[in-house]
């Protein structure tokens, strides 16, 4: 019965120019199963938010957590990079254009998360300028909304019998796309007219953005950045520390199946349940990860203080958690230690009785890897 409340896309080979504007009918999300899933998701998100608030220095953890979100988001698009490549590039802090393609894509995503947060904090809204900025940052492009002549078709990937088959055709025509984007942004921003829980709103907005597919490329990554920013903008999280992309990556077939379920059958319920479960599981995972990292950091800091071998032990601990792949230059650039002192400390931490770091030679440079931190982040 509820399917009749939503006008579907009957022919996936034809542009969905009749994509229904938002909001969707309340009956499509006012459902007991959805309500129960929402309660579970909000409970886990609240725990994560409470734990994150208690972190004395969030900068120590946020950058590395965002990097893992960026890595997972890129992998959804079949863009892969190794931990060594990723953390080396992060630690170098140099021009991203000097890095290889897959690493650049991940670093661009991380940059978009920070740029988007800054834009929202300054303007206090998610607007058209924000969307274009996210696309241009993710893709390092200088254009904007795809022009009418850009006929976009979403095709089945892989090498199976249906590879290359059209699975969805987004709206075409500049006026149509712009009108749909204006409607989407109004839906996100106007909490007076659209009094919907922020998690439900995020899930609806994510589908709508992907259905509009406003840019030539990078829509998946921009849509996942938008998820994070809606949650922070709506005061569900203070910091972007939710690994939604990791859950989507691990359930990618379901993700695409439920997206198609909305457009082809009007099945909003399974899509909303999927997204709420993503928030619930991801928040629980992030909470556990934060606890493990904070416990590890306290343990290492205590060891460094008690050893009496190190000057400024707390600062030393902070650095090896901000830079999972540390090198001497990080400490000299921060004016923490002289070069010889920094090298001596890192080499001491590599050996017994500490065994906190592992020395790696990468591209002719010595890096000292915080072994347990990298393990926790990668789990």
Image (spheres, rainbow, N blue to C red):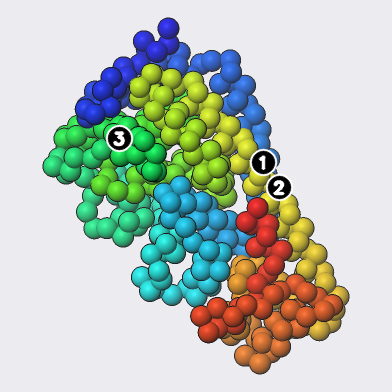
Judging by the rendered image, the residue that carries numbered circle 1 is: 284
Residue 124 point in image, percent of width and height: 41, 45
Q: Is residue 373 above or below residue 234?
A: below
- Disc with the residue nearer the chain's start (2 vs 3): 3
Q: Say whether residue 126 is left or right of residue 306.
A: left
Residue drawn 58% across the image and 61% down it: 64
Name the image quarter holding the N terminus: top left
The residues bearing labels 1 and 2 have C-alpha atoms spaced at a distance of 6 Å
Circle 1 SS class: helix
* Mark 1 burial class by Cα count in 10 Å: few <14, some 14-19, many 20+: many
Most extreme residue toward the bottom, as rendered?
340
Q: Are marks 1 and 3 in contact (CB under 8 Å)?
A: no
x, y percentage for residue 317? 71, 71
Where residue 75 sits in the image (x, y, percent)? 47, 51
| Front residue (pair 156, 367) | 156
In this figure, which residue is indicated by the disc labeled 3?
165
| SS of the residue under disc 2 | helix
Query: Neighbour class for label 3 at 10 Å: few (<14), some, many (≥20)?
Result: few
Instruction: Report which quarter residue 12 is drawn in.
Output: top left
Q: Residue at x 56, y 64 (%)?
A: 83
Q: CA gap, disc 2 to disc 3?
A: 41 Å
Give the image location of residue 2, x and y in percent.
43, 11
Left or right: residue 256 compared with residue 308? left
Residue 247 numbered mark, or none: none
Q: Nearer the viewer, residue 192 or 250?
A: 250
Which residue appears at 43% of the width and 34% of the height?
A: 256
Which SS class for mark 3? loop
């Amino acid at each position: 019965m509820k399917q009749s409340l939503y006008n579907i896309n009957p022919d996936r080979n034809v542009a969905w120019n009749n994509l229904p504007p938002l909001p969707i009918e309340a009956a499509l999300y006012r459902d007991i199963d959805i309500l129960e899933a929402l309660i579970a998701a909000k409970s886990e998100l609240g725990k994560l938010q409470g734990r994150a608030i208690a972190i004395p220095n969030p900068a120590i953890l946020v950058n590395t957590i965002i990097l893992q979100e960026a890595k997972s988001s890129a992998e959804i698009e079949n863009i892969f990079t190794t931990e060594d490549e990723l953390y080396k590039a992060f630690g170098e802090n140099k021009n991203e254009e000097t890095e290889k393609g897959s690493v650049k894509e991940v670093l661009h995503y991380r940059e978009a998360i920070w740029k988007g947060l800054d834009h929202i904090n300054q303007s206090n809204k998610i607007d058209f300028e924000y969307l274009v900025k996210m696309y241009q940052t993710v893709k390092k492009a200088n254009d904007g909304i795809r022009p009418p002549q850009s006929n976009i078709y979403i095709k089945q990937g892989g090498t199976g019998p249906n590879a290359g088959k059209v699975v969805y055709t987004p709206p075409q025509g500049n006026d149509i796309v712009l009108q749909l984007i204006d409607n989407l942004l109004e839906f996100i921003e106007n909490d007076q007219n659209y009094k919907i829980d922020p998690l439900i709103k995020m899930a609806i907005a994510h589908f709508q953005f992907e259905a509009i597919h406003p840019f030539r490329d990078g829509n998946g990554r921009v849509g996942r950045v938008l998820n994070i920013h809606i949650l922070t903008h709506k005061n569900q999280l203070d910091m972007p520390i939710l690994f939604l992309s990791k859950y989507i990556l691990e359930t990618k077939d379901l993700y695409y199946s439920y997206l198609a379920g909305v457009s082809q059958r009007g099945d909003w319920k399974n899509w909303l349940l999927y997204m709420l479960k993503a928030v619930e599981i991801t928040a629980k995972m992030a909470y556990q990860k934060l606890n493990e990292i904070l416990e590890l950091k306290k343990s290492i800091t205590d060891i460094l203080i008690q050893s009496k071998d190190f000057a400024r032990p707390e600062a030393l601990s902070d650095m090896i958690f901000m830079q999972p792949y540390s090198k001497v230059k990080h400490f000299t650039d921060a004016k923490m230690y002289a070069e010889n002192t920094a090298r001596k400390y890192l080499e001491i931490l590599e050996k017994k009785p500490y065994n906190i770091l592992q020395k790696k030679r990468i591209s002719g440079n010595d890096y000292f890897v915080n072994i347990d931190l990298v393990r926790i982040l990668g789990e």
